Image (spheres, rainbow, N blue to C red):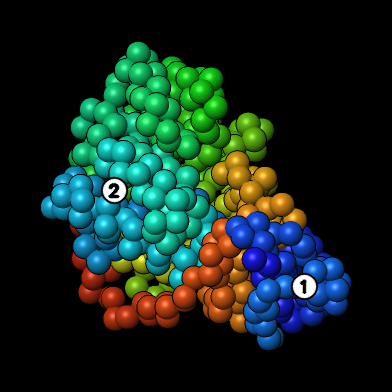
C-alpha cells in the first residue's frame, strides 16, 4: 500500500531547504520518496493521498528522556509505587500513546522497574500497542539505597556494576543508564554529591561499550558531572551543575564535555516554564543561564523532558523546546535537537530523524513554520509512527498548577535535604 502525504511545505531535515508543495511517499512502514508533489505524484500511483493543506511536514520528534512508568498526576517520588507490575505496564502503554499526541515518534525510557520497559518496547514494535519507537534502559544502575533504587538496579563496586551492565544486555536493553549523583526524587540521596567513583563509572562504560550499548548518566551535581566526563560516558542527562545550595556552571568541565564528544540532554520541561516555575535545582534565571553557557561552549544539546515526573505531562514535550529557545537556541538548532541530532545521539539516525527514502515513516506535520518559530512544534496536526497514522488527541493545557507546583518543589527540595 502506497500512501502519498502532501503538504504546503516539507522540511526533510533540520538543516534542509524547505520543499514548497512537497510530498512524502510511504510504503508500509518505510519512506520511499521525498520531494516536490509533482515529482512524487508522477513517480508512483499512490493508493491513498493525505493532503495536509497549509501544514509543514517534518520528521517525527525524539524525546531523549522519559519515564513511561511514572504518572505525572501522582506528584510522586521514585521510592515506592502502589501499582502492580501489570498496572504499571498498562500505565506505560497509555503514556506511550500520549507521546504520539506531542509528535514524538521515538523516545528513550531511562528508568522503569525491572524489565517492564523492554516488554512495552517490544509490544509497541510488534504493533500490539500504539506508541513511539522506544529505546530503553530498564532499571537504572545505582548505588545501594541510591537514586531510584526501588526500580531494581542496585550495584556497588566494579564487579557488581559490570555484572549489572551484562544483565541489562541480556535483558535486551538498548542502552545503559547509571546514576552518577543522587536525585531530588529519592529522599536522602543528595543530588549535588557523586555516588560512584571514576573507576566504577569507567567499568560501566567499558563493559557497556564491549556489548555495543550506549551509556547515559543521570548527573545533577558538578562533582558527578566531572566524574562522568572522566569515565567517558556517551550522554549526560540533566547536567544541572547542582551544588548544595544552588547551581554553579563550570567552564573547565564544559570544555571537557565538548572535547570528550559527550552530548547533553538537559531535561528542560514544563517545570522550567516561567509561569509556576518549579524546577528544584535553582532559580529559573540561573538554570536558563547555565543552559545558555553550555550552548555557547559548543556542547551538543538534545531534547529530553523527564516526562512522567510530577506535572511533566507526556503530551507537553514542546514546553522543553520553549526553554531551549529562552536559552538562545535558534529555531533550526531546536529542530535539530528534537530530530536529526537526537537521532544521532540515540544511534537511530539510520532509521529516523530525517525524511529520506529507506528510513522509517516517522512523520509529523505542524501548523506553522518550525524553521522560523519553534512554537510551531507545539501544534501537531498529523502524526505517523513507522507508517502507522495516529489519531491525535488535544494536548492538555497547563491548567491551574500553582499550588501543586509549589508543593512539588517543596517535596523535592526537602527530599534533597535542602533549604525549603
Ligand atoms: Zn529521569
Q: Secondary structure at mark 1?
A: loop
x, y percentage for residue 153? 29, 32
x, y percentage for residue 290? 52, 53
Q: Which labelled disc corresponds to residue 197? A: none
Report the residue marked by disc 1: 45
Query: Which of the two discs, 2 and 1, labels the residue nearer the N terminus?
Result: 1
Q: Residues within 10 Å of mark 2 (few under 14, many from 20)?
A: many
Residue farthest along the left direction in this orientation? 82
What residue is rendered at 36% in x and 49% in y?
120
* Residue 96 appears in view: yes
Front position in the image: 341 or 60: 60
Compared with residue 220, is residue 313 higher up or lower down, i.e. above or below? below
Quadrant location of residue 95? bottom left
* Residue 285 appears in view: no
What residue is rendered at 77% in x and 73% in y?
45
Where does the N terminus fall, quadrant-wise? bottom right
Q: Residues within 10 Å of mark 1 (few under 14, many from 20)?
A: few
x, y percentage for residue 265? 52, 49
Q: How many marks?
A: 2
Report the residue marked by disc 2: 184
* Whether label 2 touches label 1, CB < 8 Å: no
Front position in the image: 37 or 368: 37
Compared with residue 357, is residue 195 higher up or lower down, i.e. above or below? above
Q: Is residue 179 left or right of residue 49?
A: left
Front position in the image: 95 or 199: 95
Residue farthest along the top direction in this orientation? 159
Q: Is residue 90 left or right of residue 128?
A: left
x, y percentage for residue 312? 36, 64
Where does the C terminus fall, quadrant-wise? bottom left
What residue is rendered at 36% in x and 25% in y?
167
Front position in the image: 342 or 169: 169
Q: Secondary structure at mark 2?
A: loop
Amino acid at each position: 500500500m502506497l500512501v502519498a502525504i502532501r503538504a504546503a511545505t516539507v522540511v526533510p531535515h533540520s538543516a534542509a531547504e524547505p520543499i514548497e508543495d512537497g510530498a512524502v511517499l510511504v510504503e508500509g512502514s518505510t519512506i520511499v520518496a521525498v520531494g516536490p508533489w509533482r515529482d512524487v505524484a508522477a513517480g508512483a500511483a499512490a493508493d491513498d493521498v493525505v493532503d495536509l493543506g497549509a501544514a509543514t511536514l517534518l520528521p517525527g520528534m525524539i524525546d531523549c528522556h522519559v519515564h513511561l512508568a511514572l504518572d505525572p498526576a501522582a506528584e510522586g517520588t521514585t521510592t515506592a509505587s502502589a501499582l502492580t507490575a501489570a498496572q504499571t505496564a498498562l500505565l506505560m502503554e497509555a503514556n506511550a500513546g500520549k507521546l504520539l499526541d506531542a509528535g514524538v515518534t521515538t523516545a528513550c525510557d531511562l528508568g522503569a522497574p525491572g524489565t517492564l520497559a523492554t516488554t512495552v518496547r517490544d509490544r509497541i514494535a510488534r504493533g500490539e500497542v500504539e506508541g513511539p519507537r522506544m529505546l530503553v534502559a530498564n532499571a537504572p544502575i545505582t548505588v545501594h539505597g541510591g537514586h531510584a533504587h526501588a526500580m531494581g538496579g542496585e550495584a556497588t563496586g566494579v564487579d557488581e556494576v559490570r555484572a549489572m551492565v551484562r544483565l541489562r544486555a541480556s535483558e535486551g536493553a538498548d542502552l545503559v543508564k547509571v546514576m552518577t549523583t543522587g536525585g531530588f526524587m529519592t529522599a536522602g540521596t543528595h543530588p549535588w554529591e557523586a555516588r560512584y567513583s571514576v573507576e566504577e563509572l569507567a567499568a560501566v562504560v567499558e563493559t557497556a561499550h564491549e556489548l555495543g550499548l550506549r551509556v547515559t548518566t543521570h548527573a545533577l551535581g558538578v562533582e558527578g558531572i566531572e566524574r562522568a566526563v572522566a569515565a567517558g560516558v556517551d550522554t549526560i542527562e540533566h547536567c544541572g551543575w547542582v551544588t548544595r545550595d544552588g547551581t554553579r556552571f563550570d567552564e573547565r568541565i564544559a570544555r571537557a564535555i565538548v572535547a570528550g564528544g559527550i552530548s547533553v540532554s538537559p531535561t528542560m520541561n514544563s517545570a522550567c516554564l516561567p509561569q509556576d516555575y518549579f524546577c528544584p535545582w535553582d532559580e529559573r534565571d540561573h538554570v536558563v543561564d547555565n543552559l545558555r553557557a553550555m550552548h555557547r561552549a559548543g556542547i551538543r544539546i538534545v531534547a529530553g523532558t523527564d516526562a512522567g515526573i510530577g506535572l511533566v505531562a507526556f503530551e507537553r514535550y514542546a514546553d522543553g523546546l520553549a526553554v531551549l529557545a529562552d536559552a538562545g537556541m535558534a529555531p533550526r538548532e531546536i529542530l535539530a535537537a528534537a530530530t536529526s541530532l537526537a537521532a544521532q545521539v540515540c544511534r537511530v539516525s539510520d532509521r529516523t530523524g530525517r525524511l529520506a527514502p529507506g528510513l522509517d515513516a516517522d512523520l509529523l506535520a505542524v501548523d506553522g513554520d518550525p524553521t522560523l518559530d519553534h512554537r510551531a512544534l507545539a501544534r501537531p496536526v498529523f502524526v505517523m509512527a513507522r507508517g502507522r497514522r495516529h489519531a491525535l488527541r488535544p494536548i492538555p493545557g497547563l491548567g491551574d498548577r500553582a499550588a501543586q507546583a509549589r508543593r512539588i518543589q517543596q517535596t523535592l527540595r526537602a527530599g534533597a535535604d535542602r533549604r525549603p
